[in-house]
Image: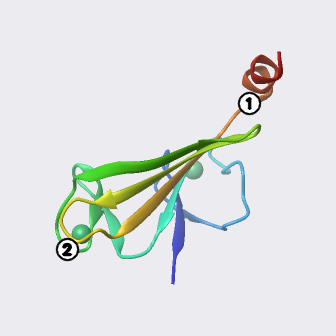
């Protein structure tokens, strides 16, 4: 089961949320990871991830990361605020 966490308050949030109750708009989701002292840590114990895909949408930026040890996939989603959105559309 994949889970979604707010990167600001590190609480689990619902998958379709685009703004956390803490105001955070940066989310991470995936399977087999947790938050450790160095941030996102794979359940294999590794905390290093390599970026393999980055997509920019109008309302959000999505990045796919793989654990450098076991290739476990973790995805981050960063929602843009209105000012950013206008900037993109210009
Ligand atoms: Zn939050
Ligand atoms: Zn791993």
Counting labels gives 2
In this view, the residue in front, 19 or 68, is 68
The quarter of the rendered structure image containing the C terminus is: top right
Residue pointed to by mark 2: 44
- Can you tell which mark lies on residue 72? none
Q: Quadrant of residue 87?
A: top right
Q: CA distance from mark 1 to mark 2?
A: 35 Å
Q: Is residue 48 left or right of residue 59?
A: left
Q: Is residue 65 above or below residue 70?
A: above
Q: Which residue is mark 1?
A: 81
Q: CB of residue at label 2: within 8 Å of ligand 2?
A: yes
Quarter holding ligand 2: bottom left
Give the residue displayed 19% in from the left and 74% down from the top: 44
Q: Is there any visible trace of residue 24 in the rendered image? A: no
The secondary element bearing badge 2 is classed as loop
**Residue 61 seen in this snapshot:** yes
18 on left or right of 33 = right
Seen in the picture, residue 31 relative to 16 is either above or below; the reply is below
**Mark 1 neighbour density, 10 Å: few (under 14) some (14–19) many (20 or more):** few
- In depth, the one of 33 and 75 nearer the eye is 75
- Residue 75 is situated, as x and y percent measured from the top left of the image, at 49, 58
Residue 50 in percent (x, y) is at: 30, 50
Kindly give the residue lying farthest to the bottom in the view shown: 1
- On the image, the x and y values in percent for residue 57 come to 71, 41
């Amino acid at each position: 089961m994949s889970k979604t966490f707010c990167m600001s308050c590190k609480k689990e949030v619902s998958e379709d949320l685009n703004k956390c109750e803490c105001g955070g708009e940066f989310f991470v989701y995936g399977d087999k990871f947790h938050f450790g002292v160095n941030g996102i840590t794979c359940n294999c114990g590794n905390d290093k991830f390599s970026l393999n895909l980055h997509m920019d949408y109008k309302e959000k930026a999505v990045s796919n990361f793989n654990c450098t040890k076991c290739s476990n996939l973790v995805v981050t989603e960063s929602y843009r605020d209105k000012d950013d959105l206008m900037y993109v559309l210009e």
